[in-house]
Image (cartoon, rainbow, N blue to C red):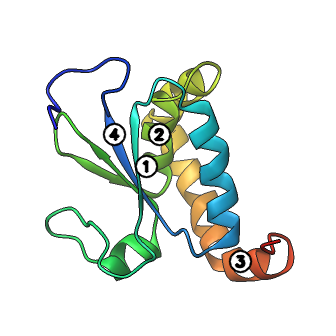
Amino acid sequence: MDTEQTGPGREQIAVYFDGACPMCAKEIAYYQRLDTAQHVQWVDVAGPNPSCPIGYDQQTLLARFHVKDMQTGQIYDGAAGFAKLWTAMPAPWKHLGTAASLAPITWLLELGYRLTLKVRPILAKHLFKRS
C-alpha cells in the first residue's frame, strides 16, 4: 500500500484495538462509522496472529490503545492515541483532537484514560454486554 499520499481511501493512521472487549468494540464501531473518508486502518489485535507494528506484541497492544501515524511511523498510545485518532475524524472530533494534542490537555486526558483502564473490565462486563 502506498502510504506516502493521503486523501480519500488512503489510510493516514492505523488504530490497534481490542475487539474482544465489548466496550472497546462499541467505541471503535462508532469511530468506524465516522471514518467515511477511510483515513483509518482498523486493526483488531484480539484474535490469533494479529498484525502488530515492529517492536510491539499483542499483549502490549491489548493493554493500551495504540495509534500509528502511517506517514511518520510514530506510535501514540493512551490519551495521545485518542487525540491522534480524533484528528483523523471529521469535525467536531478533528478540532477536539487538535486541542487534546496540547501537552496540558493530553496529560489530563491521560489521567482519565488510566482510570478508565482500571474500571474497564467492570464496565465491559456490566454495561457493554454483547447482544
**Alpha-carbon distance for marks 3 and 4?**
27 Å
Residue located beneath label 1 in the image = 81
Crowd around label 2: few <14 · some 14–19 · many ≥20 (10 Å): many
Q: Secondary structure at mark 2?
A: helix
Q: 112 or 34, which is in the foreground?
A: 34
| Disc 2 to disc 1: CB gap under 8 Å | yes
| Disc 2 to disc 4: CB gap under 8 Å | yes
| Three-letter amino acid code at the position of disc 1 | Gly
Q: Is residue 23 left or right of residue 50?
A: right
Q: Secondary structure at mark 1?
A: helix
Crowd around label 4: few <14 · some 14–19 · many ≥20 (10 Å): many
Crowd around label 1: few <14 · some 14–19 · many ≥20 (10 Å): many
Q: Is residue 1 left or right of residue 105?
A: left
Q: Earlier in the sequence, mark 1 or mark 3?
A: 1
Q: Earlier in the sequence, mark 1 or mark 4?
A: 4
**Which x, y percent locates residue 104?**
50, 40
Residue located beneath label 3 in the image = 119
| Disc 1 to disc 3: CB gap under 8 Å | no
| Three-letter amino acid code at the position of disc 2 | Leu
Residue located beneath label 4 in the image = 13
**Which x, y percent locates residue 42?**
43, 50
Q: Secondary structure at mark 3?
A: helix
Q: Is residue 56 left or right of residue 115?
A: left
80, above or below 88, in the image: below
**Alpha-carbon distance for marks 2 and 1?**
6 Å
Residue located beneath label 2 in the image = 85
Tell me the quarter of the picture where residue 12 sits.
Answer: top left
Q: Earlier in the sequence, mark 2 or mark 4?
A: 4
| Three-letter amino acid code at the position of disc 3 | Val
